[in-house]
Amino acid sequence: MTKESAQPLLVIDDVHASVEGKEILKGVSLTINAGEIHAVMGPNGSGKSTLSFCLMGHPKYVLTSGRMLHNGQEMTGLTPDERAKQGIFLAFQYPTAIPGVTISNFLRAALRGVRGGDVPIKEFRQAVKTQLKALGIPESFMNRYVNDGFSGGEKKRLEILQMAILNPSLAVLDETDSGLDIDALKTVAAGINALRSPERGMLIITHYQRLLDYIKPDQVHVMFDGRIVKSGGPELALELESKGYEGFRPAVEPVGATETR
């Protein structure tokens, strides 16, 4: 099957979504093919994180119209764990600490949940060892409690390690660069690049162009007020950097304006 005829990995088709009765997404459409990285950029309140939570099936975020399909299957009505079993992964902007639970136990439980069955300890240890080496993370990391006392960079590296172990077909990274200094940013970006593959699609949500200095997206989408107002190649992020978000704000028709003929 050629890439042109292959089924898209993710289709978001005219999606409208609300949170506590307030409409946030107002007709979002985009398509991601396997092997592609797409970046969604926008100011605070534009709907970027709402899009990520809708993709993962957070119950607070209600899809009111439109469709989301993963590998051709409609996602509406699927719970977050069902979506995870389908191969969808969400890296959080603010990962939660779980004192008393080691990273090793956490990752094995997560992998067991995604697979829907037990994970042989030998297989798990080998997979972890391989990914720790690939991501440049020391083995002692596995004995620490999940995000307990972690720096911002350590939290984001754990998110990338989770993605590597769970091996999703679609990874959604919600502001992975948030709160990182330049060294931590480079480390996290290197981890994301290491997990880029022809079988996996990624949706990177970010405020800033700086992350895209290290990760080259196939497409960039600018979001404003719950809509994607412009899409383009990697050069769009540079244009955004020079113009700022105000340069992409759509014109608003004055209230009461009527069509003239």
Image (cartoon, rainbow, N blue to C red):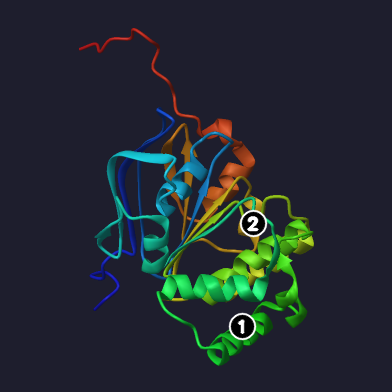
Label disc, if present, on residue 211 of the rendered structure: 2
Q: Amino acid at mark 1?
A: Val
Q: Residue at x 54, y 69 (%)?
A: 163
Q: Residue at x 62, y 56 (%)?
A: 176
State the image coordinates of residue 155 (x, y, percent, origin top left).
70, 61
What is the CA distance from the residue labelled 1 to the residue labelled 2?
A: 26 Å
Sequence order check, earlier mark of 1 and 2: 1
Label disc, if present, on residue 128 of the rendered structure: 1
Q: Residue furthest bottom?
A: 122
Q: Amino acid at mark 2?
A: Leu
Up-down: is 226 above or below 195? Answer: above
The quadrant holding residue 78 is bottom left
Q: Nearer the viewer, mark 1 or mark 2?
A: 1
Q: Residues within 10 Å of mark 2 (few under 14, many from 20)?
A: many
Indicate the secondary structure of the residue bearing disc 2: helix
Q: Residues within 10 Å of mark 1 (few under 14, many from 20)?
A: many
